[in-house]
Image (spheres, rainbow, N blue to C red):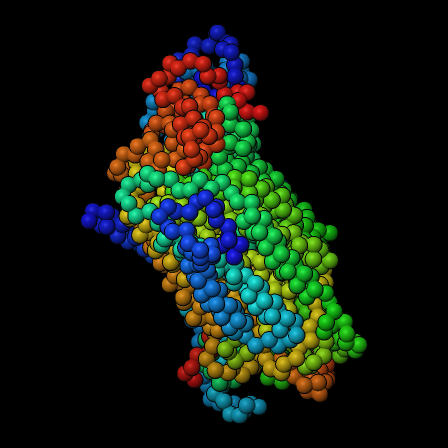
Amino acid sequence: MSATTVETPDTSPAAPTPEMGGFIRRLNAVTGVVLGLVLAVVAWQVSSRLLPQPEELSHNHHDDAVMIITFSVWAIGFLIGIGAFVGPVRWLLGRDLTEADEEFLAGKDQGVARYFRFTTDHKVVGIQYLVLTMVLFGVGGLLAMLIRTNLIRPGSPFLNPTEYNAIVGLHGIIMIIATIVMVTGPFGNFIVPIMIGARDMAFPRLNALSFWLLFSAVPVLLAAFPLGGIATGWSAYAPLSDQSPLGMDAFLVTIVIFAVSSGVAGANMTTTVVRMRARGMSWTRTPIFVFGTTTSVALGLVAFPMFMVAMILLAMDRGLGATFYVASGGGSPWLYANLFWLMGHPEVYVILLPAFAALLEITPVFTRKPLFSFTAAVVGIAGIVGLSLFVWAHHMYVAGWAPALNGPFMVTTEMISVPTGLLILVLLGTLWRGVVWTRLPVLAVYFVLWNFIIGGVTGIYLSDVPVDQAEHGSMFVTAHFHYTLMGGALTATMGAVAFWFPKMTARMLDERVGKIGFWTAQIGFNITFLGMFAVGLAGQPRRVADPSSTFAAGNLVSSLGAYVIGIGMLIFLYAIVHSWRNGEPAPGNPWGGKTLEWQVPTPVPLENFAVPPVVTSDFYSYGEPPETPAPESVSVPRPADAAAPGERPLEGSAS
Amino acid sequence: MSLTEARPADAEPPGEPSTSRPAWRRAPIFPILLIWIVLTALLVAFALVVPARLMGAAASPTMREIETTFTSFSLAAAPVAALVWAILLYSLVAWRYRGGGRPTDPGPPVRGNNRVQVVWVVVSTALCLFLLIWGLIVIQPSTSEASSTQAPLVVDVTGQQWVWNFEYPAAPGAQSDELYLPVNQRVLFRVTSKDVVHSFWITQMGVKVDANPGATTTISVTPDRLGTFDIRCAELCGLYHSYMQTHVHVVRAEEFRSWLATAASQAPTGEVPSPSPSGTATS
Amino acid sequence: MRVSVGAAATVLAGVVAVGIAGTAFARSSASPPLLKATVNGTAQTPQGTLPHAFLQLDTWPDSLAGPHGKDGGPHPDWVSYGPSTNLAVPAHSLVTVTIRQYDTGEEITNPFFAAVHGTVDGTMTVDGATVRSADPEHIGHTFTVHGLASNKDPLFVSVPLPAVADDAPVRADGYPAPHVVTFSFVTGGPADYVWQCEFPCGDGTYAKFGGPMSEQTYMSGTLTVTAQA
């Protein structure tokens, strides 16, 4: 019934359904963990015995290969154990899933248990992503507190440099993964299908697969701690990564899993949006948030394979003694740097686009105005996507790789400020003379614009080759990208959480507590990273465990500010947890939004729409005269009148 | 400023007398203009004083150029940032919905304004072009470097986890752990690494280039201030990355010559000194 | 009311979590016992008459004799310095260090570190003979002190430690007879420095700077110049 991947007109009459279903009904995250661990231990034992034993110099390759195999087998075992491959296997056996099985997989009538299973319902996957993202932010934030504590005064670090480097690297990669999925994961999965009038994603099983792949990567990443950590920072520059302890193997397996996960998710979401929009939802009527998430995951489809390839080459260097990145063996560190930044720069827009698009979606609702120039917003997003593929080498101005290319990359990099400026214009234009209803979601718009202007302007300095020659590799860079990724994207995501919280949890967010946390975090944020700009300009390099006492004052300010962020974020977290459990029940459309997700009941029924909606105008017609067919021209039959005939199924509505 | 002239004429709130005052004298343009001017002035003052002061006194024309660029970019960005923040501030105060519950009346249904959009794009493109042209001119190796006719002093810089060392091909054998340079003479650094990627950074001279294993990168600078400055590694290179630091001493030419002669004369001869390395396992 | 208690409890839980994690990390990165130089009399130096401090170190081909306990700790096969890597010497003093070098070696990658730098007269003695450098083809380890660039009296001392021959006879304690390297340097004011080995003697990972080279307490450590002479 739900839009399943493999549409089989019920075959295999031989299969007695209840019994066949019985096996998959017993699989869940626990069986996944058990099978994963068992297989990993077996793989570890077998590979460490069977792999050729070390000559004196190569014994690291042996250990590295064992680690890589063990972690990979864990992930595969976990996925088998949770039932990720039940569908394909049954199909190969000629006993495809029955409708009852599909409904079970979609989590029908299972309560909380469905969050711990290989559940295909996009709303379950969205919630799973939301919780996992918050957990990742918790771990990454804790590491950030340790980093700042270590830097609070010079000369007496409480961590030794090995541990400090490991913590910096883990903080980096955990936060990067969390920010990459923080919008497209929870909201892209939960909200976007409803927003476009679909009953589920195009490939529900791939949807579940993308989440559980990511889930299986988390313990691998955390295993880097006892294995010596990621001593290279999250950028894992070669050949330092060739030299690092076994934690690096955990890192590279994590990245490969993550790249597969984001590839699966990206293909799924792109297909969903292109093929499954409701009837009448032409591209010009498609909500801007859908543009943001889709371009983000599509950009990810280009970007993350680069990182995966870089990591596979690293795995071959470490595990097999290849020399892709080893100059004395004919390799080059610049190969790694190029592959990494070919991912790295599109990646920041993978993070920023959906976050900005969420703001573009929020602002009209809370100013009761149409989006100021939908076209400009789309052009802005398209411009960013296009240019972002051609700016990567601005991270390598001082690498010595190709000095002649510095000019051209400076041109593309600075040009990207024009489409970005368009998005800011659209936000400002929408605020202009609006009825600004200052709830938490719209506060995020204000803070993002404040932070992002700082992040953007400092980005322009860094895009300039001579200035970069002074600031590259300094804390100035660290402060800059925290202003864009945390002050911009994460702040926007906090707004998005507040905005869609009632729809996703069926509870209202306690905004009193939430706002206290939000304001505290924002103030702490600005203290922390303005201080960091100062020490960066004064010449403190990034990632130093024990900065010179010259920078003591700025580092103290940054550390104190970081504690304020921590307190604010915890209060915000409490607002979420508390409201999720005890909050007021939310009505279907608390904000008076016009997009489709606000037209379905809360909690959202399993198949979202009893009858597929038909779209006759766009969703921003606030305050427009009714003759331009506006608000309720979106015909969304409530489930009550589910009997309403006439509307076609979803396929074919897009074109 | 582009936004300020661009209001939909038909969106005039009712009740406000449509007087003869020009549009820019009325709300919301006028108050936003005021906030904008004040914010711009504050940001300009900030841009003129703070960053250059934080970066410290420049010790080379390169660094001076960088500080000038930084300040100019800040000045160019100040009005833009001020405009955005002015609109934000004003809207938060003046357009804030003060009733309880959900607003019932919608805002003016403005869907874009071609004039505003065109002005915005043109202005931002112009600013972008200004930055680009500035940047492209500055990266030309013209000004101080190419004009000097004398051959540069060559220094070989080697990064090894986690120490820099320097060799001076002009005086064979001369090597040091702290860098010595003569003032007002162009220096060409040939930078390489024995192991991982480091980044050779003379903070006060605005010199930075990566030290790559298996490759030699070059960068040149003309130190023009006497004194002692900082050399740091700017690329995470492992355990003691934060201690991979040393000093550069910029001294007068004659002092440099005598230092170089001494350094060369103290060079280890290269021949194996007394205890033969193997076979001395007696004690 | 209930809400503010909850929020406060959440913040408190966060503080506790950070505290636990921080304590765990700090404990696992505890320094080995401080090895203080012993002051004995005064010495004539180019800087005048200064207190004379003595420090004795060893370099071992494994970790069984160093600060890692009898069983060698987690990596008994890693090369190590001993008896500790956490050193303290008095300020404004002449420090004479004696290192007994028990390890074999090979060619050093960077000849700079085959020469003696930063000691009194730029020399060291190896088994009694005064030299300015060691044979770059046969280096076992180096002892190289360096530190932060700002607000410090710069201190850079680097001496090569010649390798023991591969075929040197092994004594009763399981090690060959060592080379004894002695050198002296003059300290400035109180400050923190680090020291490390610059001969790539780590395990087989890239550039042989992994393993013991990249973890404190093996081939690297700290050198604190303390105020009281």
Picture coordinates of residue A441 (x, y %)? 38, 45
Picture coordinates of residue A377 (x, y %)? 53, 42
**Position of residue A155 in the picture relative to residue B237 (left or right):** left
Query: Residue furthest toward the top?
Result: A13
Picture coordinates of residue B32 (x, y %)? 44, 58
* Residue under the point 42% across and 42% down: B108
Query: Residue furthest toward the front?
Result: B20
**Position of residue A360 in the picture relative to residue A498 (left or right):** right
Q: Nearer the viewer, residue A570 or C37?
A: A570
- Compared with A579, A16 (above or below) is above
Q: Quadrant of residue C44?
A: bottom right
* Residue under the point 33% across and 31% down: A588
Quadrant of the image for the C terminus of chain C? bottom left
Q: Quadrant of residue A579?
A: top left
Q: Is residue A82 among the parts visible in the rendering?
A: no
Q: Is residue B99 among the parts visible in the rendering?
A: yes
Q: Nearer the viewer, residue A33 or A519?
A: A519
- Compared with B142, A230 (above or below) is above
* Residue under the point 55% across and 20% down: A652
Q: Quadrant of residue A368?
A: top left
Q: Nearer the viewer, residue A316 or B96?
A: B96
Q: Nearer the viewer, residue A63 or A125?
A: A125
* Residue under the point 72% across and 74% down: B144
Picture coordinates of residue B178 (x, y %)? 62, 76
| Total count of labels | 0
